[in-house]
Amino acid sequence: MDTKGKNRHVDYDKPACPVEATLELIGGKWKGIILFHLLEGRLRFSELKRKVGCVTQRMLTKQLRELEASGLVNRTVYAEVPPRVEYELTKEGKSLKSILNALKKWGESHAVQLIDARVSSES
């Protein structure tokens, strides 16, 4: 089934569905990291790419476009040569601050140990 450009779910009335809706907007490997770094403030594309790390330019562009389409990120293009493009969180994007910080704190307390244990058991 082709789901390109389509939401996976259309009925968000069930009790856990707000979680599904949120994950649909911010889920995936890169979106949370992008949003976390944009908590620092407005960043140019190259600065964001450097902070995120091993993401390809194509994937970073794709994820930023999805975040922009979702209303979480603003993109500003300046008419300069070469063009300067900056990204920043919208009001809705900024409302994720406590969630992103909670994910960071949980990751520091739990995720690293769980991943280490999983890697050890696979060896």
Image: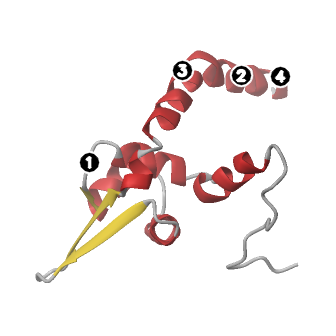
Lower sequence index among marks 4 and 3: 3
In this rendering, the count of numbered labels is 4
Question: Would you place residue 25 above or below residue 77 in this image?
Answer: above
Q: Residue at x 71, y 49 (%)?
A: 18
Question: Would you place residue 99 above or below residue 4 in this image?
Answer: above
Q: Nearer the viewer, residue 88 or 119?
A: 88
Q: Give the residue type at disc 3.
A: Glu
Q: Nearer the viewer, mark 4 or mark 3?
A: 3
Q: Give the residue type at disc 1.
A: Gly
Lower sequence index among marks 4 and 2: 2
Q: Residues within 10 Å of mark 4 (few under 14, many from 20)?
A: few
Residue 63 visible, this orientation: yes
The picture places residue 89, in percent across and down from the top left corner, at 36, 55
Q: Give the residue type at disc 2.
A: Leu
The picture places residue 39, in percent across and down from the top left corner, at 34, 43
Q: Quadrant of residue 43?
A: bottom left
Residue 53 visible, this orientation: no
Q: Secondary structure at mark 4?
A: helix
Q: Nearer the viewer, mark 2 or mark 3?
A: 3
The residue beneath circle 2 is 114
Lower sequence index among marks 4 and 1: 1
Q: Nearer the viewer, residue 46 or 10?
A: 10
Q: Give the residue type at disc 4.
A: Ser
The residue beneath circle 4 is 121
Residue that protrudes farthest toward the right in the picture: 1
Q: CA distance from mark 2 to mark 3?
A: 11 Å
Q: Secondary structure at mark 2?
A: helix
Q: CA distance from mark 2 to mark 1?
A: 31 Å
Q: Give the position of the N terminus as an image quadrant.
A: bottom right
Q: CA distance from mark 3 to mark 1?
A: 23 Å
Q: Residue at x 82, y 44 (%)?
A: 15
The residue beneath circle 1 is 41
